[in-house]
Image (spheres, helix red, strand yellow):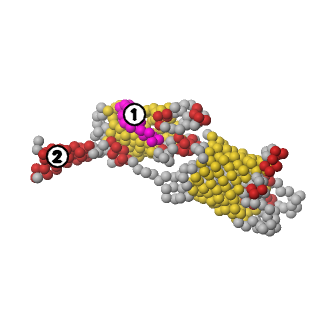
Amino acid sequence: MSIFLKSSLIFFVFTNIFFSQTDLLNEIDFDKEKEVTSVFKSLKVVNFESTKLISSGEFAFSVSHRFGSIKYGFDNFFGLDDAITRLNFIYGLNEYSNLSFSRSSYNKTFDVAIKARLITQKNEFPFTLVLYSSLTIDSSIDDEIYPKMSFNNRLGYFTQFIISRKINKNLSAIISPSYFHENLVVSNNQNNSQYGVIVGGRYKISKRTSFNIDYGHHFNRSGDSIFKNPLGIGLDIETGGHVFQLLFSNSQSMNAINLMSSSTGDWTEGDVFFGFNLYRTF
Amino acid sequence: MNRFLVYIIFFSFLGSISLHSQQKYYTKSGYVTFDSRIDSFVPVKATNNSVSSVFDPSKGEIAVLGFIKDFNFKNSLMQEHFNESYAESDIYPKTTFSGNLSNYKSNVSGVYMISGIFNFHGVKKQLDKIPFVVEFFEDYIKITGEFVLNVSDFNIKVPKIVKSKIPSKMYVYVDMNLVSN
């Protein structure tokens, strides 16, 4: 065979082999813009809301306890003798919003809240943005103590934008500018309209456990206030359909508005409360 | 030099004929389901309706690609666990198959044995002679079939506490209609 024939035959064979099976797969291969998932395992970071929502049509129930102060030691069994309980029922209205209803034995407070995801963290957008808004009703205040009170005085409003970022597969953080208004404040010098910011995060220490922390900073607390900023530190444990959050907090309240405005504990004096949040999704 | 040029042109022409003689068939809405087929309170079953596939009818070669996040479970918590802890879809976002049909005859509908490489969770497994039904219609080709996979073959980490809840076998069912461009 002439050299020209040989080389052109080789050329012909090459052009056919070139298109192999892997090329067939490459033809349909592409990358999709990725929405981040599993930013937080639970609906709260420790004391305050995370950007997690439950799915459309789903139902979740949470039980939270805050015990008495651990500072009395064995006497009140490290606070277990004095327990405050909050029961919360959450319903997934649709893919991006949740409605919840709760009752806490702290000031016998009822609350109804809505949580809505506005933007999800994706390839191009670096944050998830969630709006959380709650109305609280303090059913413990009595006209024996406040003779001129009306139903209105029982109400409180709390609204915040929760901005979260999943930094890497183990670390997520939030920052939540918040506005709240208490229709009844304890001190005359305290403005009813109050502002603050919450910062927090979670760090996964294993596939199903994480170390969580959140802190609320109040911007216009009155100078004579006896209350402190709330700091919560906890451990999340996830098992199948439940998430347990074991925590220490300097507040016995479990509603955002009470946490920000009237937390009585003090970390610097070891005046903290042991507690837990337990979630079950149905 | 002249003769060389003639041969090049002639054989390239032949080559191009064989490459373009038959159009390939595609889909972006292939249906793939995996199911443990164990009756339980919450069954382990998920469906992906946007699987991509390409079929070369001149050679009987096929490639399939699906995104793990597109597999929908009825229970969203199960879907979250599947993506985060088992399939680890942030690290391995896609599952693919690349193979060919044995004893393939173009335009003849029937049962063909498909062999090739299946890829999931970063593990490549050779699948051999899986019977698939290939039906040639006027405007489309329908490919349906089913195969079984062992969960243990894919390096999936299952913690002891939930070991009894994770099934050992998954039945994968494929149903795709591919059209030529």
Residue A257 position within the rendered picture, expressed as x and y whole percent measured from the top left: 73, 58
Q: Which of B39 and A262 is in front in this view?
A: A262
Which residue carries the number 1 mark?
A: B127
Please provide the residue range marked out in magenta: B113-136
Q: Is residue B142 visible?
A: no
Asked where in the image residue A175 lies, by quadrant, the reply is bottom right
Magenta residue check for B121:
yes
Answer left or right for A34 relative to A184.
left
Answer left or right for B45 relative to B65.
right
Judging from the image, mark 2 belongs to the subunit labelled A
Q: Residues within 10 Å of mark 1 (few under 14, many from 20)?
A: some
* Residue B95 vertical placement versus B152 (above, below): below
Specify the label residue A242 is tagged with: none
| Predominant SS along the magenta part | strand
Q: What residue type is labelled 1?
A: Leu
Residue A88 position within the rendered picture, expressed as x and y whole percent measured from the top left: 71, 48
Give the CA distance from mark 1 to mark 2. Answer: 38 Å
Local secondary structure at mark 2: helix
Q: What residue type is labelled 2?
A: Ser
User: Looking at the image, which residue is at 65% across and 59% down?
Assistant: A199
Which residue carries the number 2 mark?
A: A7
User: Looking at the image, which residue is at 16% across and 46% down?
Assistant: A7
